Image (spheres, rainbow, N blue to C red):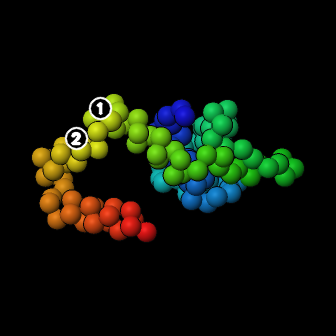
Amino acid sequence: MQKLTRAEEQLMQIIWKLEKAFLKEIMQELPEPKPKQSTVSTIIKILGDKGFISHNTFGKSHQYYPLVEKDSYAKAYFQQFLGKYFDGSFNRLLSFFHKEGEIDLKDLDEILNKLNEEKDQ
């Protein structure tokens, strides 16, 4: 799966949230200062070319919807990130955040307990 640029990901987050959206609705969701509508249209076309979205046509308007689920993209992106920065090791990732003070032992225990609960189900 291709990696999205920051601008592409911003639009995908909106499309995932709305599930189906016309350009006008996407524009309303963008924070200020809003980009030009032509810029957003170009990025939407790129997302379509990359296979992330498609559209239904209503006259001259298009209603866009995702072809790639948010969870599927997140999983692929995270696996790439984990491989690139932590040699694919979740243990190294957790160790890194623990060393940096971003996660404490209580958080790690909660993660382990949740994983054990899911495993038992």
Q: Quadrant of residue 46?
A: top right
Q: Residue drawn 49% across and 34% down? A: 3
User: Is residue 74 or residue 32 the one in the foreground?
Assistant: 74
Question: Is 78 situated above or below 115?
Answer: above
Which amino acid lies under the numbered mark 1 shown in the image of this protein?
Answer: Asp
Q: Is residue 104 left or right of residue 45?
A: left
Which residue is farthest right? 59
Q: Which mark sits nearer the N-terminus, 2 or 1?
A: 1
Which disc, if any, is residue 92?
A: 2
Provide residue 53's location: percent of width, then percent of height.
66, 44
Does residue 37 show up?
Answer: no
**Residue of label 1:** 87
Q: Residue drawn 68% across and 51% down? A: 65
Provide residue 99's location: percent of width, then percent of height.
12, 46
Few, some or many residues within 10 Å of mark 2 (<14, 14–19, 20+): some
Q: Residue drawn 54% across and 40% down? A: 8
Q: Quadrant of residue 91?
A: top left
Does residue 79 show up?
Answer: yes
Q: Residue drawn 33% across and 30% down? A: 84
Q: Is residue 91 left or right of residue 14?
A: left
| Element type at mark 2 | helix
User: Is residue 32 or residue 113 the one in the foreground?
Assistant: 113
Provide residue 47's location: percent of width, then percent of height.
62, 38
User: Is residue 121 or residue 11 the one in the foreground?
Assistant: 121
The N terminus, quarter of image: top right
Q: Is residue 12 left or right of residue 97?
A: right
The C terminus, quarter of image: bottom left
Tag 2–tag 1 contact (CB < 8 Å): yes
| Element type at mark 1 | loop
Q: CA distance from mark 2 to mark 1?
A: 8 Å
